[in-house]
Image (cartoon, rainbow, N blue to C red):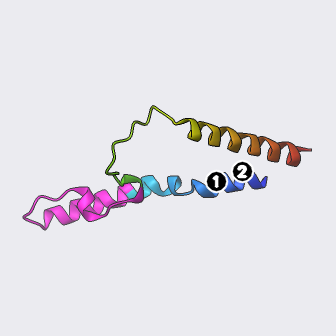
Amino acid sequence: MPLYVADLLLDNLWILEKEASERMRMMCWMTAQVNCKKKLNPEDIIKFAWEKKSDTPSNTNTMSQQQWQAMQEKAQQLRKLKMSHGK
């Protein structure tokens, strides 16, 4: 496995555990809700990093020029790594 692929996999490893974590939270929530008089939300049991809400509203459909350039540079770096490892 090329190094650039391993780096991308490690950066996004949490995605593999997301479904299992959500399932476990739901089971814990159901158990806790049966034994509690107060109404609970699944988020009351545990909050995950991917659920953090920012204070500033963000539009996910827009990208700044700096972000665009940074993504282009990253793509070029990955292409160069792929070309150097593919030979």
Is residue 28 located in the magenta-colored stretch of the structure? yes
- Residue at 11% x, 58% y: name it: 39
Mark 1 lies on residue = 9
Type of residue at label 2? Answer: Val
Label 1 sits on a secondary structure element that is helix
Mark 2 lies on residue = 5
Tell me: 57 left or right of 61. Answer: left
Establish if 75 lies above or below 23.
above
Corner quadrant of residue 49: bottom left
Tag count: 2
Establish if 62 lies above or below 82.
above
- Residue at 59% x, 36% y: name it: 68
Dot 1 alpha-carbon crowd within 10 angstroms: few under 14, some 14 to 19, many 20 or more = few
Corner quadrant of residue 77: top right
- Residue at 25% x, 57% y: name it: 42
Establish if 37 lies above or below 9.
below
